[in-house]
């Protein structure tokens, strides 16, 4: 896949334009988005991501278009899992509801910059060392097992990571919010506010999520352009998605199992690809023999969509049954 410089430039400009719309049109005036507003803008951002996939499909073919869609759906599903932690962070820092948009947007912007660094590093590793697919694959299988062990559990507390502990130790912080300002003066001394700290919390938390999401998407496509675009478009719609599904997150009890299945599937796909790339190690009559065929992109996309559909439907069905039993009525009764 040959991507001309102008395609990179146009894509980056489109992403910057979408960020500008968010900063100028949505968070400049603090407010709590209504469900209707969140749904409308979520649909717009998803529509932009889908349209980009159509462009890739027409310009570079169905194979790369499918790789992009598989990567985007995977990153989007992992982003929903991230929202659980974002809710905990917002609650832990007692962020006023009207300022949560700005916190999310700045945190997402930081995450986009940091993820781009990860993507560039990952692409360089793959280009130089094909055996890195073994590491990525094994790591994703291990992550899937860890995810499966904790699937269904709901964390209720958020714990600061090393970045935030360092910031709080080095920089004096004001005890309360000062509107949506990042710094303030108290007795002539410049202090950072909890607003800046919580933004760093969102950004650094997403950086931790990137540790498994970046290897996952490289398991679906080796094209740096597609990896970057899928990550960017999944992150850009995350702010709207937060307010759209905020009240539904605790109902998606089986999502963790679905994500574990997806990560394990991609991990196995990476290990199979590594065997093909490194021509290991089955030999018959002096010729390399591949016992396991590579998993096509269409199969990967179908598997990811099916798992997400099943786990979401099962979660909502279970939630409806639990609510009906709590209300003393039979599930499905009117």
Image: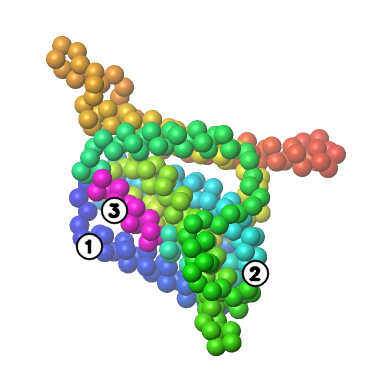
Residue 31 in view of the camera: no
Q: Furthest residue to the right? A: 328
**Separation of residues labelled 1 and 2 (CA atoms):** 42 Å
Whether residue 143 sits left or right of residue 39 in the image: it is: left
User: Mark 1 or 2 closer to N-term?
Assistant: 1
Asked if disc 1 and disc 2 are in contact, CB closer than 8 Å, the reply is: no
Circle 3 SS class: helix
| Dot 3 alpha-carbon crowd within 10 angstroms: few under 14, some 14 to 19, many 20 or more | few
User: Mark 3 or 1 closer to N-term?
Assistant: 1
Q: Nearer the viewer, mark 3 or mark 1?
A: 3
Specify start and end residues of the magenta stretch as a single range.
112-125
Residue 159 in view of the camera: yes
Placement of the C terminus among the 4 image quadrants: top right
Which residue occupies the foreground of this view, 294 or 126? 126
Circle 2 SS class: loop
Identify the mark at residue 34; answer none if there is no mark.
none
Counting from the top left corner in percent of width and height, residue 71 is at 39, 45
Q: Residue at x 63, y 47 (%)?
A: 155
Q: Which residue is mark 3?
A: 120
User: Mark 2 or 3 closer to N-term?
Assistant: 2
Which residue occupies the foreground of this view, 69 or 208? 208
Q: Please, is residue 8 above or below residue 119 in the view?
A: below
Q: Which residue is mark 1?
A: 6
Counting from the top left corner in percent of width and height, residue 311 is at 57, 37
Q: Which residue is mark 2?
A: 96
Q: Please, is residue 229 above or below residue 191 in the view?
A: above
Counting from the top left corner in percent of width and height, residue 8 is at 26, 60
Counting from the top left corner in percent of width and height, residue 21 is at 45, 71
Whether residue 133 sits left or right of residue 169 in the image: it is: left
Task: Identify the image quadrant of residue 268.
Answer: top left
How was the colour assigned to the protein in this rendering?
Answer: rainbow
């Amino acid at each position: 896949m040959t991507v001309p410089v102008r395609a990179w430039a146009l894509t980056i400009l489109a992403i910057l334009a979408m960020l500008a719309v968010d900063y100028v049109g949505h968070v400049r005036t603090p407010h709590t988005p209504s469900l209707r507003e969140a749904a409308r803008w979520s649909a717009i951002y998803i529509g932009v991501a889908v349209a980009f996939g159509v462009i890739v499909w027409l310009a570079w073919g169905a194979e790369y278009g499918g790789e992009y869609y598989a990567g985007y759906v995977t990153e989007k599903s992992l982003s929903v899992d991230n929202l659980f932690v974002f809710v905990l962070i917002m609650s832990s820092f007692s962020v006023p509801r009207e300022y949560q948009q700005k916190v999310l947007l700045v945190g997402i912007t930081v995450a986009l910059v940091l993820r781009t660094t990860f993507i560039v590093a990952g692409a360089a590793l793959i280009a130089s060392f094909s055996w890195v697919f073994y590491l990525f694959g094994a790591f994703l299988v291990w992550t899937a097992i860890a995810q499966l062990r904790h699937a269904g559990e709901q964390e209720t507390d958020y714990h600061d990571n090393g970045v935030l502990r360092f910031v709080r130790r080095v920089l004096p912080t004001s005890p309360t919010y000062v509107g949506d300002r990042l710094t303030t003066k108290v007795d002539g001394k410049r202090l950072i506010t909890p607003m800046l700290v919580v933004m760093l919390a969102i950004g650094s938390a997403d950086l931790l999520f990137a540790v498994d999401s970046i290897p996952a998407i490289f398991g679906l496509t080796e094209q740096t352009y597609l990896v970057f675009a899928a990550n960017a478009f999944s992150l850009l719609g995350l702010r709207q998605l937060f307010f759209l599904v905020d009240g539904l997150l605790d109902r998606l009890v089986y999502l963790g199992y679905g994500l574990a299945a997806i990560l394990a599937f991609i991990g196995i796909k990476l290990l199979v690809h590594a065997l093909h790339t490194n021509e290991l190690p089955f030999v018959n009559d002096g010729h390399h023999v591949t016992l396991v065929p590579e998993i096509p992109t269409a199969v990967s996309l179908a598997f990811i969509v099916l798992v997400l559909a099943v786990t979401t439907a099962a979660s909502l069905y279970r939630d409806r049954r639990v609510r009906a039993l709590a209300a003393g009525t039979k599930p499905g009764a009117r």
